[in-house]
Every structure is written in structure tokens, then in C-alpha cells.
Amino acid sequence: MSMIKRLSVLVLLIVVVGSARAQSSNGSFYNRFGLGTLSEYGLGAYLSQGNASIAARSASVVNLKNPAALNAIVGPSHVFDIGMTGTVLTQSLQENSGNTMLLGLNNLNFWLKLGKGGGLTFGASPFSDASYDIQDDYRVDELAGDYSVRFVGNGGLSRYYIGYGQRLFEGFDVGVRLALLAGTITRSQYLGDNELLGSSSVTVEESASQAVVDFGLQYTRRVGQRSTLTLGATYRPEVSVTTRTEKELANGQGDSLLLTGDDYFILPEKIGVGVSLQAGGLLVSWDGELERWGANGAHDDYSYTDVWRSAFGIEYAKNQVTERYLDRVKYRFGMGWENHYLRYESAQRPTYFVTAGVGLPVQYGLGGLDLGYTYKNLSSTSGRMVSEVAHQISLNVTIRDRWFQKRVYD
């Protein structure tokens, strides 16, 4: 396959991953509000460490959390990653509970070595998922009887990005990334199951397309004979995102009314700091982040609030250059806490998570499989709110120096 064909396939894959949504019959209950469930930058290896990677620098794994780390790869000239996840989501309210399965692609990334001390990456990943399917039953009175309202959501925002990291001088690296957030969120309400009230529906479709930039830096210095300490920071400035809104009201007789207009939301300022210590085959990392979602206004039944996040991660590999396979396997663990960016009925939703995983080398570093598990407990501070527990399995496939390699025949 020629280089042009390979690049064409890669671009097509990026578009597919960027537009892909988790395939499920029912997402989070809270996807009804705001932008839905948000996703961070990150590949499988770091997700298994709680995604605590603002200060991480790996010679073999691309770090998407901080663009300043994009030049850390040593050896290969290009690296291709594709990631996928499967999640079992359990939702409960008082004595009632139910499960749903979420499946989908969550990342596609291509990294290139570029110049002296530089690294370039581009790819696609979901930014938000607003899929849900909920039905509520009501009773008006004895005359009107019962009726039901079905709430259905689809779509979300995708993230298409290109980033570059460069070493300025020994121990000091900087990076910048430009991303395009684009997509459509559709939310519908259907009134039915009542002959007296009839049937009707309201559908709201919101579309957005906005460029977003973020920056990163890392400072690394040697500590002792075999250890290095890295300090990292990331910053995303606030940006106002304009949305094109279409609202359609329809009744059971076929009559409809279409309203159009513009609205906006604030993608808030985001500040992150991190520290990591590499001591032989052991990597220990910590991240702290603040995202100022409170810059957005309140709505009738929910409001935005600032997000604080803290994450801790560990990775251990006994020996990366030995012939013994098990000694080259990487073992990972992480844990952390964050609060949700939305308040529903004035109540907070803290999230606790624990992660674990392994990195399995393939063909002495020419490829790799990263398997991970994440447990998330999206608890509630109110007994009237839905609590959610997620069990997620992730698989990330890495291919190094093979994408443009030509076959040689004798």
C-alpha cells in the first residue's frame, strides 16, 4: 500500500473515531443536562494510572494529557494508537436499579518524530456523550388518568486535534495543541399513553463547531544516579462556544412548529499541575486540576459548578531490555477523586475511581497491548438522585514503525 493510501486510510479512521458514539440503549441519567458525560485526553496506558500524566514522560507511550511530553518518545519514528472501551453502567434510585452496556471506540492517535527535540501528534476522540433513554410515568387525576413522558438523547461533541511538543533547552519542554470541537446533540421529549391528553413531542437539536487551544510545559531534572523528577503544568484558556439551535414542537395530528436561534456556552479555563518521579522501573505520578465550569449560568433544574480533580498513579516494569517476557510487562494502578461539573437539584455528585492495568509488549517493542480496568462510583449527596457505578474495560493497541514500512521480497 502506498504512503498516500495509508494516509488516506488514517484520515478516514480519524473521522470514524471522531464521529463514533458509544453504542447503547441507555447512557447516564445525567446526560440529559449540559453537554452530557465528558471525556479527557488520554490513551490506555495512562488511563490505567488514573490518567495522572501531566508530569509523565515516557520513552515508549504517547502522553496526550500534556502536549509538552510529545517529544519524549525515543526510538520509533512514528506510533499509531487505537483505543476502545466496554462499560457496564449500574444506575440505582432508592430500591430500584438497572444495568446497561456501553461499547465504543474512544481514541485514535498518530504520533511522528519531527525535527530535533520535537514530536507531532494528531487524532480524534470523543469530548462528550449525550445518549440516554428514560421514561417517567405520571398521574394527573382520576379523569385524565396516567400518562408517560419519554426522554431520549443522542449525539455529542467530537474532538479533532493536532499537537506539537518541543525541547527548548536541557530539561525544559513546551507544547501546544489545537483542537476542533464539533458535533450535534439532539434531545427529545415524547408525551404518550393517554387518549385524553393525546400525544406530542418536543425536539431540540444543538450544533456546535469551535477551535480550542491548550498549552503545556514540563521541567525535568535528575535526582541521584537512577531517578528523575518532572514537574508539569497545563493550561486551557476560556472560550465561548456558539451553538445553533433548532426546536421543533409537534402534535399527534401532524402539526408542527420549528423555531431556530443561536445560543452559547462557556468552555471554561482549565489549569493543571503535576509531579512525577521515575526511579528505575517505577513511575509515581500525581495530578491536580481545576476546571471553572461555574462560569456558565444556572438553568431551571441544574447548574454548573467548578470541577476539582486529584489523581494518583503508579507504573512498574522490572526490566524493559531483558529476554524474559514477564519482566517486560508493565503493571499499573491509579486512583482519584473529582466532583461533577453539574449540580442537579442543588446537590453535588462526587466521583471516586480506581484503575488497574497491564502493558503487554509485542515483538520486542514494535507493538503493544494495554489492558485496563476502571471502577467509578458516581455517588449522590441526595437520596432523591440517581447513583451510578461504572465498571469499564479498556483495550489500547499500539503499533510502532510499521505504518509506512514497505515489504521487501527476495
Image: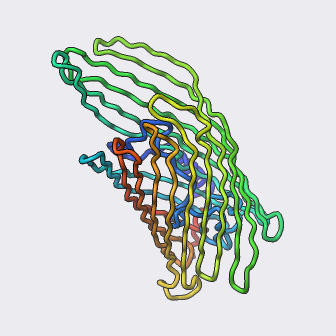
Give the quadrant of residue 250.
Answer: top left
Which residue is at the far bottom? 323
Look at the image and name its color scheme.
rainbow
Q: Nearer the viewer, residue 34 or 15?
A: 34
Residue 382 image-quadrant placement: top left
Q: Quadrant of the C terminus?
A: bottom right
Q: Is residue 194 left or right of residue 118?
A: left
Residue nearest the viewer, comparing 67 with 409: 67
168 versus 59 height, above or below: above
User: In this rendering, does residue 13 appear at all?
Assistant: no
Residue positioned 42% across, 51% down in the render: 104
Query: Can the viewer see residue 33?
Result: yes
Q: Give the quadrant of the N terminus.
A: bottom right
Residue 8 in the image: x percent, y percent? 58, 49
Which residue is pictured at 50% across the width and 47% down the height? 340
The x and y percentages for residue 96 are 25, 46
